[in-house]
Amino acid sequence: MLLLLTLMGLCGFTAYRVVQQLGLAELQTTGLHRLDLYSTSLEREIGKYAFLPDTLDLERDVLALLENKDHATLAAQVNVYLEQLNERAGTLSIYLIDTSGRVVASSNWRRTDSFVGEDLTFRPYFREALESGHGRFFGIGTTRGEPGYYLASTLSDGSKTLGVAVLKVSLEQLEKSWATVETPAMVSDENGVVILGSVANWKFTTVRALEEKTRSAFDQTQQYNRRALKPLGLKELRELDHGARLVSIAKDDPAIASAYPVAGRFLAQSRPLPGTPWTLTVFSHLKQVDDIAQSRAALAVVGTVLLFMVGMMLNERRRHLKDRLAAREALQQAHDELERKVATRTADLSTANQQLQDEVSDRIRAERTLRAAQDELVQAGKLAAIGQLSTGIAHELNQPLAALRTLSGNSVRFLDRGDLATTRSNLERIAQLTDRMGRITGQLRTFAHKSSAQLQAVALDRALDNSLALLEQRLLQAHVTVRRDCPLPAPVALCDADRLEQVLINLIGNALDAMAGHAAPCIELSCEALGQLARLTVRDHGPGLTETVMSQLFVAFFTTKQAGVGLGLGLSISADIMRDFGGTLNASNHPEGGAVFTLEIPLSEKGAPHE
C-alpha cells in the first residue's frame, strides 16, 4: 500500500506539474499578444489628441490674450473658440493658463463651475510644461471630480513663454472596450495606483502599500482629489520567466458582476507604456489551466493504480504457489521452536524475579543508610550552631555581670558612708548594664522566634544595626573593619524585619568565614534606592567565588565549609526569603576582589518604617 500510494502521488504530481507548465507557457504567449493589443489601443487613444495643445499657439487671439490677460473682449472670443474646439475634438475640456498659474480662458466658461480664474500652480502638469515644454498627467479634476488624462504644452511668441495650453481627455471609452474582452486588464501609475481598468471596482485602488510621503504628495497636488485609494488585495505568489508572475486577488465585493473571473489566482504580465510612467498589466485566470492539470493528474493516478493492480495479481499468484509448498514444513518448525522458547522463558523468568527482589532489598538498605547520614549531618550542623551561639552569649554577658557585681558592692559601701550621689551614679550604671543585657537577649530572642511573615515598612539602616549588634563579638574578635554607606533618610523597604535580619546575619557570617586568616579583613555594607527597588549589598575582601561554587551557590546542602561547620542551607533559605518579599538575591565577584551579595527589595509606599 505504501508503494502504491507513493507511485500514485509521484505520477499524479508529475503529470500535474508538466500539464500546468505547458498551460502557463500557452497563457504567457496569449498574454503577450493581449499586451500588444491593449498597449496599441491606449497609445492610439492618447495619440489622437497629443498634437492639439501645440496648435493653439497658431491662433493669434490666444497669444494676444496671454500677453494682455485683462482684455475682456479678447477673453470672451478665446473662450468661445476653446468651447467650439472642445466640442469638435470630443475632449472633456481645454483651457489656457498664464505663467503665474491662473486660468485665463476655458472651454467650460459658460458653466457655474468654470475653470476661469482658478489657480492651478499646484498641478504637476503645469510645472512640468514650464520646465520641459510638455506635461502629461492623469488625475481627478478638483472642480467636477472627473478623472482624465491631461496633455499640456507651452505657448510662446518665439521669444518667451506666454502660458500653457491644457487638454483634458477622457479614457472612459477605452475602458468600456476593455470590459468586453475575456480577461481583465489595468493601467497603474508610477505610485502603484490603478488609473484605468476593465473592472470598475479596481479603479483608484493600489497594487502595493503607499508610503506616507506619497500620500502627503497626493494631498498637495490633489491628483486623486482626496480619494481613499484602498488596496486592491493583490498578492504575489511566485515569479516566472520573462517577467510573468503568479498572483492572487482577493474578492472584496461579492456583488461584483463580470463576464470573466476577477478574483482568485492569475498569471500577471506587465509592460511599461512608452512615453509615460505607467505600467499595463494583463491578468489571465488560472482556473482552466488548473482544471486541465488536475484532470490529467487524475488520469495518471488511475493508470498507475491499474498497472499496479495487474502487477500485484501476477506476483500474488506466484507467491501463492510457492507458499503452499513451504507451509507444512514451516508449521512444524514453528511448533518445535515454540516449545523450546516456552521452556527457556520459564527458566529466565524465575532467575529474573530473584534478581529483582535482591535489587529492591539493596536499594531499601541504601536509602536507609543515606537518610541516616543526612540526619547525622543536620544534627552536627545544629550542634555547631548552638556551640557558636552559646560562646557569643557567654562572652557578651560576662563583662556586664562582672561590672554589676563590682558596682553593687561599691554601692553598699558608699551607702554606709552616706555618699548618696555616688550610690545614685552606681545604680544608674547598673540600670544601663541591665538594659544592655536585655537588648542582647532580646535580639537573640527576636532572631530565634518564628517570624509573622507579614510585610511591613522596614528601614534598611535599622536592619543593618540589629544584624551587626548580634555579630558584634565575632567582628571584634576577628578585628574586622566595617564600612557602611547608607544615605539619610535611609531607604524603607517592604519586607519582614526579622527575616531580613536573618538574611543579613547569614551573609555577614559567611563573609567572616570567607576572610578567616585574612591580614586586614573588611566588610562593606551599602544601601540605596533605585527606582521602585531598594538595593542592599554585602561585600567581603576574601578570595571571591569560583565558577564551580557560583553555579551551585543557592543549591540546598551545598557548602564549601568543613563537615559539621555548616549545612549548606543558609543561602538557599535566604534566596527563598527574598523571593517571598518579591525581591532577589544575587552573587558576583567584585572587580577588585572579594564576593558581593546583592539584595533587591521593593520599596515601601507607606513611607514611615515599622518600629
Image (cartoon, grey):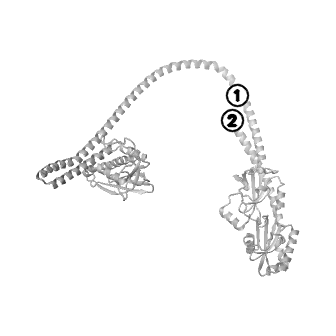
Question: What's the amino acid at mark 2?
Answer: Leu
Q: CA distance from mark 1 to mark 2?
A: 18 Å
Q: Is residue 351 above or below residue 132?
A: above
Local crowd at mark 1 within 10 Å, few (<14), some, or many (≥20)?
A: few
What element does badge 1 sit on? helix
**Residue 532 seen anywhere in this rendered image of the structure:** yes
Give the mark nearer the N terminus: 1 vs 2.
2
In front: 69, or 67?
69
Q: Which residue is mark 2?
A: 5
- Residue 435, given in percent of the width and then of the height, sits at 25, 49
From the image, which quarter does the N terminus lie in? Answer: top right
- Residue 106, given in percent of the width and then of the height, sits at 82, 72
> How many numbered marks, from 0 up?
2
What element does badge 2 sit on? helix
In front: 247, or 33?
247
| Residue extending furthest toward the left | 417
Q: Is residue 119 above or below residue 564?
A: below
At a point 40% along the width and 49% down the height, the residue shown is 456
313 sits left or right of 424 in the view = right
140 sits left or right of 603 in the view = right
Question: What's the amino acid at mark 1?
Answer: Asn
**Residue 280 seen anywhere in this rendered image of the structure:** no
Q: Is residue 453 above or below residue 481?
A: above
Circles 1 and 2: CB atoms closer than 8 Å? no
In front: 131, or 70?
70
32 sits left or right of 464 in the view = right
- Residue 270, given in percent of the width and then of the height, sits at 75, 58
Q: Nearer the viewer, mark 1 or mark 2?
A: 2
Q: Quadrant of the rendered structure where residue 359 is?
A: top left
Local crowd at mark 2 within 10 Å, few (<14), some, or many (≥20)?
A: few
The circle on residue 315 is: 1
- Residue 249, given in percent of the width and then of the height, sits at 73, 51
